[in-house]
Amino acid sequence: MSEPTLCGVWVDKAGQVHTSVATPDGGRREETATLRPFAWLAAHATLPASVADLAIEDLNGPGVFTRLAHADDLATYDAFLKEVRAGSSGGVDAIRPLESQYLLQQRRHLFADLTFAQLRRCQLDIETGSTDGGFSNADNPGDRVLAIGLRFGERNRILVLAEPTDEAEKALLTELNTVLAEEDPDTIEGHNLFKFDLDYLRVRCKRHKVPCAWGRYGQKASFRSSRMKIAERWIDFPRCDLPGRTVIDTYLLVQVYDITTRELTSYGLKDVAVYFGITSDDDERTYLPGSEIHAAYTHDRERFIAYLADDLRETRGVADLLLPTYFEQTKTFPILFQEATLRGTTGKIDLLFLEHYYHARQSVPVPAEVASFEGGYTRSFQEGVFKNVLHFDVASLYPSLLLAIGRNPRNDALGVFIPLLSQLREYRLRYKQLARTADTEELRAEYQARQANFKILINSFYGYLGFAGARFGDGELAAEVTRRGRELLQTLIDAFIAEGCTILEADTDGIYLASEPYFDQPEQLLAKVAGVLPKGIELEYDGRYVAMFCYKAKNYALNDGQKVVIRGSALRSRGIEPFLKKLGDQLIRFLLGADPVSPVELVNDYRRRLPRHEVPVAELAKSEILGMNPDAYERLIESGGKPRRASAEVALRMEPRPRMGERVSYYITKKEKGKTADWQRARPLAAYDAASEPYDPDYYLKKLADWLERYAPFLDIPPDPGEPMDLVLE
């Protein structure tokens, strides 16, 4: 008989495990279990006197951590860890949070037998008001929560402040606790949920002495400062954890999504909803500027509630798109759902390995040292515009090469890596096929999410090898994979050239080429070239394009006849001014034959309007994400630190000050005596005053001249006239 499906896990301070399990009718039932907390000990670890209260086992294999300690209760465990760490540097290794220990120990994963549609989900959004008409601040006594919007499936429960009094707000916050206990959701989802909604509710609950009883098992929320690395940026946020439930912030998920696409110019809910097609320009979406929300609550309650309901709908739509992959990861790893959305791939894969090592009673290694090595094949062969373009790529190149090599990482004494990779690849292929053939749309979506999860996972196995913090990493094996990958791609390039193709761009596992003879019959070219590949490595035809603009390595644009796709940060940087982005988009559409209008006409229009201040400042304002908290930046500058940054200087002028990871928009004022640098002349966009501090036309005319100089060599290429089409960044 299989164990019930876990939908929530929480370990209390006494070490008791509280679980929420799925019932046949879709409900949830609470159960309790016992955790025997454990830790791995190194051979050199000095064991304290309290070791007598633990069970110590010797482990097999050559790993650094050769012993395994189990405690019968959490108090003994914590005291033991403290003593060992004090006496032996690096002598103990323990998994946190304890919920992952329990899942790993029991070999149970959350939501194992559930589909995404069977999750009990809640979307949450609040509307707030201020006494002075400015930005609502939870610390101000008179600023309040005006409404709490909750969505459960297709049902909305909108809790509205009865009147602007402390008593009414206290009742509203208490009602939130009651509704969450009644509905008992597995997840609470929101956009910018950590930094705004939950943090605002926390402050107001504290003011009115209302417990933040949003968790299961009668438990309160816990808050702590946290940070998350997204690509090259760190984001600070006040993390909220709910015992037995999962907090999902789609604001963070969107930024992780944008690491690879680099398409979004704003991470705000309204813009994201339009980008994903959740809300279109034709939809009758209710919009309310922040300055009008309080007035709408007072005088137009119907519009106020409609606005909140649309926020909930869009939040659910974004989560519907981005959350399934993390849901599947939770079913794969011994990890909490919330941790799956906030932790990097390396930590997740480590847990997968440790699960095997724990149950095999195998000693555990420390992360291997990884020397730098040459990466994948990346080369731009041409510049300019080319027609009749085909794209071919090698399916799962690095995982396929790893399986072909068949060698486990040198730290993997148990030999888990290759068997796991092979198994995950089989799962991926199975669900990829099921996603095409399943009987219902719901099943097809479910299987698509599963195959996408396994695709990400198997591709991550290679990246894991070369990561310095990976416990089972192996830089030499990673280098061998990339070496073979480069040789294989060069072999393909030579084969395509032999067939008369013009190679345009090659990157890791894919090749763009121009070929008029094969443009309408790419399968024939595929059949002629695929034979040069070794067994187990498959070449796939991945698309054709009427035109391609090659700018430089990893920066190009494609026109498939229906839409334009732009790739590469040089062509679509989020940090450039909107007017330059508009020019770049027009340039690409023009060069690819998607629009007959030359960008030169737009350049000349800006030249005429800028000196007369006729260009709206919003088109000129640059947006940057803060890489440091303003308070920390201020202390750095006061101590003589450099360099000064325009966005950071602007953040110091803003009230309230933004946090690290948030976006700041600013424009540049005219030069003054002693103030010529950008950071000295930068001003917040929101505070623009055309009379007292107008923008500097000469500054932006110089930007315009630089842009034209950069792209002028390509403007001699005559475009093919055609109907305008949508611009899609990818």
Image (tube, rainbow, N blue to C red):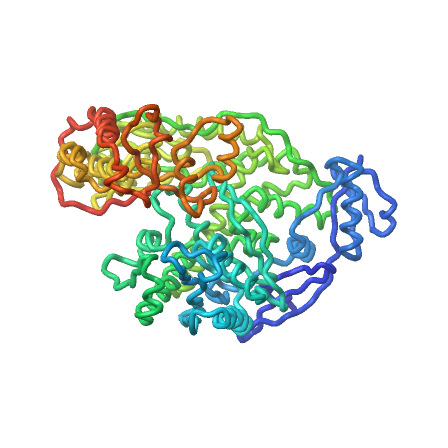
Residue 521, percent across and down?
25, 40
Residue 35 lies in quadrant: bottom right
Q: Is residue 499 visible?
A: no
Please, which residue is most extreme toward the bottom here?
25
* 245 relative to 98, above or below: below
- Residue placed most toward the observer, 542 or 569: 569
On screen, residue 533 versus residue 515, left or right, reads right
Residue 55, percent across and down?
83, 51
Residue 556, percent across and down?
29, 33
Identify the residue at horizontal 31%, vertical 70% (top origin): 299
For the N terminus, give its image quadrant. bottom right
For the C terminus, give its image quadrant. top left
Residue 207, percent across and down?
55, 62
On screen, residue 695 versus residue 454, left or right, reads left
* 229 relative to 247, above or below: above
Identify the residue at horizontal 52%, vertical 25% (top origin): 373
- Residue placed most toward the observer, 26 or 581: 581
Identify the residue at horizontal 63%, vertical 45% (top origin): 353
Residue 34 lies in quadrant: bottom right
* 529 relative to 5, above or below: above
> How many numbered discs, if any?
0
Q: Is residue 583 visible?
A: yes
On screen, residue 507 versus residue 17, left or right, reads left
